[in-house]
Image (cartoon, helix red, strand yellow):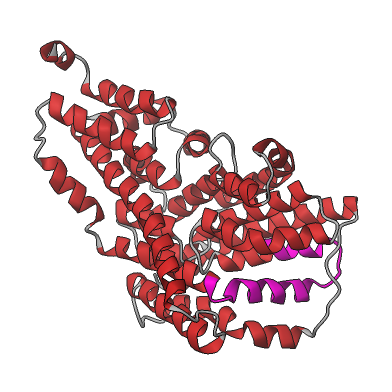
Amino acid sequence: MLDFIRQADPAILLLVLFAVPLMLRIPIAVCLGFSAAIVAWIYDMGIDMLSYNFFAGVAKVPLLAIPFFILSGFIMERSGIAARIVYLVETLAGNMTGGLAIATVGVATFWGAVSGSGPATVAALGLILIPAMVKNGYDKPFAAATVSVSSGLAIVIPPSIAFIVYGGIANVSVPALFAAGIVPGVIVAAFLMLTVYIISRKRGYRGMPRVTTVWAAFKDAFWGVMSPVVILGGIYGGVFTPTEAAAVSVFYGLFVGIFIYRTITSVSVLIDVLVESVKATAVIMLVVTCAGLFAWVASTVGLVENGAEVLLALSENPWVLLLLINVILFVAGMLLDAISIYYVLLPFLLPIVAHFGWDPVWFGVMMTVNLAVGQITPPVAVNLYVGARISDLTMEDITPPVMPLLFATLLALAVIVIFPSLTVFLPNLWGL
């Protein structure tokens, strides 16, 4: 039986062993690791190498930043920074048309510089912003959709966990990716703000009247506003690396929560934060290790080379290939999480990037923006699931108001694809 199976193409078998469990809704990490292990065993690729590859998948210095940034996000949410940032932006928007919806996009954009995770941003901000919008007359599904979609910016606005993973796989400078994500993130936010303004104007939605001055709100939120300044300023100023910046952000959040806002008042709060952080980190790292095994086996059996050759054979026109790649990423984002997509598809795509001479920094940002769209596109749509859960709605309720916001995000993606200079402007300016 084993000899019969060995007559099959190992690349095809790998794809089948990955796809079938995935369609049965088995967790993605299990699908990746299971298919890689079975193919390695059947074709005598050295089953003892799996443990080494499993370890090597996470034993990378850039990946150390992931647990620190996750912990930092939880600490800053518990320390009250999120609530104060929300209040500051709401005060800035005042009672203008669509003020709360625009403020939601602005807060999510800013919080992306703290969290780095889309679902975590939805959870941190949704509990504050969705009730506030509903209280002021906004439709609840629209409020939940606005929070869920704009929170996708968390993987584009630096520091981004997605950029850290991409940089490790593609061997690209993480600080350069962080810098490159700023302008595209602002572009996506601008398109979303315009869209929610148009919808709000049509429906008569407004912001909240100011109950305090902007200056008073800013003073209260000052330490929260400074958090991305400390993190990104330290990186671009050459004070510390992204990994060191992640560790600094943890201690900064603790300092603010314990000594400034005095919201972290007991050891039990810290234990809760650590537990949640460990859970989130474990999920990501399990996917990273299993996806690393899959990528190694796929490369060994020739799946990567064959896949790249197939794509290049379809067209030599770079714009046609770009369109095709973005369609593939869009569909993949509807089914898989971003980290898995990086590990599964990047080995196929990097030879194409090299063939056409595309800037890998720009390509990484473009790919990440596309995957951010995947976080809000059913059937997986992790951001929408979190948004629906915390607002007591169903996916059917929240999906219709997502559609115009999804279209706006795709238009922003088109701008990023057509004008690469917008992405690489800051990295080039700062010499990264």
Residue 257 versus residue 185: which sits nearer the camera? 257
Q: Residue at x 51, y 61 (%)?
A: 181
Residue 277 vertical placement versus 339 (above, below): below
Q: What is the quadrant of residue 103 in the picture?
A: bottom right
Q: Residue at x 40, y 47 (%)?
A: 339
Magenta region's main secondary structure? helix
Q: Residue at x 42, y 80 (%)?
A: 234
> Does any portion of residue 39 appear in the rendered image?
yes
Image coords of residue 421 (percent x, y): 53, 59
In the displayed structure image, the side of residue 379 where residue 40 appears, left or right:
left
Q: Which residues are magenta?
A: 78-105
In the displayed structure image, the side of residue 417 where residue 149 appears, left or right:
right
Image coords of residue 23 (percent x, y): 43, 25
Residue 195 versus residue 325: which sits nearer the camera? 195
Q: Is 88 covered by the magenta stretch? A: yes
Residue 50 vertical placement versus 285 (above, below): above
Q: Is 247 covered by the magenta stretch? A: no
Image coords of residue 214 (percent x, y): 76, 83
